[in-house]
Image (cartoon, rainbow, N blue to C red):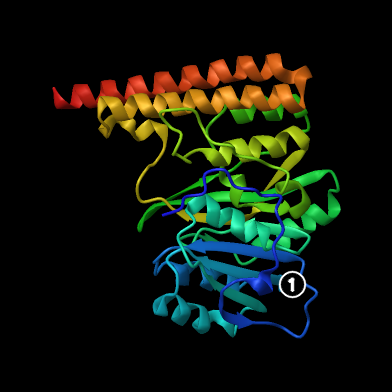
Amino acid sequence: MSEILKPNFSKIINLEDQNIIYKKESKDDNFLITIGIPTFKRNTLERALRSVSKQTFRRFRIIVSDNSGYSKETLKIVRKYSKWIPSLYLIAQEKNIGALGNLSFLLNCTSTKYFMWLADDDEISNNFLETLTKILEKESRAIAAMGSWKKILNPNQSQIIERSRNSSYIIRIIKFIAGSQNDSAFYGLHRTREIRKTKFEGYFPPNKKIISNCCYLILFDLLLKGEIIYTKECFWISHSYSDKSYHASSGLTFTGKIKILIRRINVYFLYCCKAFKYRKVILPIVFLASLLGLSRDILNAFINNLKKFILKG
């Protein structure tokens, strides 16, 4: 497998030159949004396409990129929902380019004003595109927009995570780094020209081949340049049947926990590097917020492990 760990989001490639397995194009090609859906042998793709097919805003194109190559099952699902989607492309990768490479590929193929990623097991509310497009069309200084996060914990339980708007640039930076961990805006609606300027250049050893938490670094690039506007009027719906956050590390080996801690240190260190490169004036604030964020991570891990120890006893 040729894993792409350092994607080039700024690269532009011609969609029509790719390995197109299925194509449904509309006579009206005045599309405003591209939705990139990366997939790899997932029958949950049907859930994602079903939610997009019901959007009240119709000026969008979907590109599905299958990292497993040609798949009859994926083609069957795409054909099933194509009748309700204005423009739909299915691309079969000739080799596995990795999860991050696939995300980059979808953005590289984009030619519309706005872009968003949608995981192949997630959903969006029917008014998601309409609501976020209105925000970005109205708020010229906003670089991205995101709805509330509806987190499906199990088939019978869900949690709604909302974020309020803050007019202060510094407060937004501090909350992002030291506040509650929330990278949902990665799956929001982005101005294509701005998301193309973001970078993830990898971590230091022993996490050199890991991409977990890269969304935070991509979002931090955006926050340095402008505001991500959140709204409670629409939802991004994720199916999180297992907690993948740092708080769930209590079940890992000691080595696994250390690797996660080093990865978190990587993230905070890279926040400081990005601030030094793009906004030197806020570097002291980013550094202090990073210390707070790391302290929070270590404290949470300690509390979770202590609870596990007490329950065992």
For the point 39% across and 41% down, the residue is 244
Tell me the quarter of the picture where residue 172 sits.
Answer: top right
Tell me the quarter of the picture where residue 289 sits.
Answer: top right
Nearer the observer, 127 or 282: 282
Label 1 crowd bin: few (<14), some (14–19), many (20+), radius 10 Å: some
Residue tagged 1 = 59
Q: Position of residue 88 (x, y in %)?
A: 62, 76
Q: Is residue 171 above or below residue 223?
A: above
Q: Secondary structure at mark 1?
A: loop
Q: Position of residue 212 (x, y in %)?
A: 46, 40
Tell me the quarter of the picture where residue 31 sits.
Answer: bottom right
For the point 53% across and 66% down, the residue is 65
Is 309 positioned to the left or the right of 63 in the image?
left
- Quadrant (top left, top right, bottom left, bottom right) of the C terminus: top left
Report the amino acid beneath label 1: Arg
Q: Position of residue 236 (x, y in %)?
A: 56, 55
- Quadrant (top left, top right, bottom left, bottom right) of the N terminus: bottom left
Q: Is residue 82 above or below residue 131?
A: below
Q: Looking at the image, can residue 243 be seen?
A: yes
For the point 71% across and 48% down, the residue is 195
Is 112 positioned to the left or the right of 294 in the image?
right
